[in-house]
């Protein structure tokens, strides 16, 4: 009797395991490129004798962009994913991250491109596009990032020292 119950239990376990869908493969990318972040603008007018530019046509309040070489990590799994922003962009928007990661939404994985969106703040949503042929990544909204992605190794690299 025990053997029959054990056999039925074993069959039910193997049937349940076969019915579960396989976990979708996770694609991990490491992207290196240039981050452009708006520089803060000093709206307080200073005269020449205060160490500022003299008032005149050369004075501008137009925002300027600061460029820096940065790295972004992206993970895509099924219809979702997450990304680790460059520190300068996360700090500029006071992005609420989970251990440095932001969730990706509206992820579409096509034959030629991967697209998605991520929220930098309550008012700022950025768009992400990765060309699967060239590896080129472009992110727009609240600071621009452009660069090239490579597939991250599945296993950690050996230590250098």
Image (cartoon, helix red, strand yellow):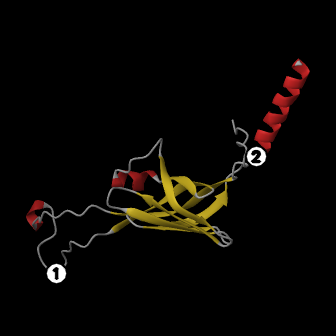
Residue at 53 percent of width and 55 percent of height: 72
Instruction: Find residue 93 and report its horizontal and vertical position in percent.
Output: 34, 55
- Count up the numbered dots: 2
Specify the label residue 36 is tagged with. Answer: none
Q: Are marks 1 and 2 in contact (CB under 8 Å)?
A: no
In this view of the protein, which residue sits in the foreground, 117 or 79?
Answer: 79
Quadrant where the C terminus lies? top right
Specify the label residue 19 is tagged with. Answer: 2
In this view of the protein, which residue sits in the foreground, 49 or 95?
Answer: 95
Instruction: Find residue 95 and report its horizontal and vertical position in percent.
Output: 38, 51
Element type at marker 2? helix
In this view of the protein, which residue sits in the foreground, 12 or 33?
Answer: 12
Q: Quadrant of residue 36?
A: bottom left
User: Does 138 appear above or below 2?
Assistant: below
Residue at 79 percent of width and 44 percent of height: 18
Looking at the image, residue 47 sits to the left or right of residue 28; the answer is left
The crowd level at tag 2 (other Cα within 10 Å; few <14, some 14-19, many 20+) is: few
CA distance for labels 1 and 2: 72 Å
Q: Quadrant of residue 41?
A: bottom left
In this view of the protein, which residue sits in the foreground, 149 or 76?
Answer: 76
Query: Would you say residue 124 is visible in this rendering?
Result: yes
Quadrant where the N terminus lies? top right
Residue at 70 percent of width and 38 percent of height: 159
Instruction: Find residue 106 and report its horizontal and vertical position in percent.
Output: 51, 63
Residue that label 1 marks: 57
Looking at the image, residue 15 sits to the left or right of residue 144; the answer is right
The answer to which of marks 1 and 2 sits earlier in the sequence is 2
Instruction: Find residue 127 and report its horizontal and vertical position in percent.
Output: 47, 66
The crowd level at tag 1 (other Cα within 10 Å; few <14, some 14-19, many 20+) is: few
């Amino acid at each position: 009797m025990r053997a029959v119950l054990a056999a039925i239990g074993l069959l039910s376990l193997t049937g349940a395991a076969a019915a579960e869908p396989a976990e979708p493969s996770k694609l991990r990318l490491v992207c290196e490129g240039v981050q452009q972040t708006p520089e803060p603008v000093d709206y307080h007018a200073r005269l020449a004798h205060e160490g500022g530019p003299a008032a005149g046509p050369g004075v501008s309040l137009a925002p300027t962009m600061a460029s820096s070489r940065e790295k972004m990590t992206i993970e895509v799994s099924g219809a979702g994913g997450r990304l680790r922003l460059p520190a300068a962009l996360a700090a500029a928007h006071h992005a609420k991250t989970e251990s440095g990661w932001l969730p990706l939404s509206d992820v579409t994985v096509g034959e030629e491109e991967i697209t998605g969106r991520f929220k930098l703040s309550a008012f700022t949503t950025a768009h992400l596009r990765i060309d699967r042929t060239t590896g080129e990544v472009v992110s727009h909204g609240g600071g621009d990032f452009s660069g090239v992605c490579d597939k991250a190794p599945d296993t950690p690299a050996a230590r250098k020292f």
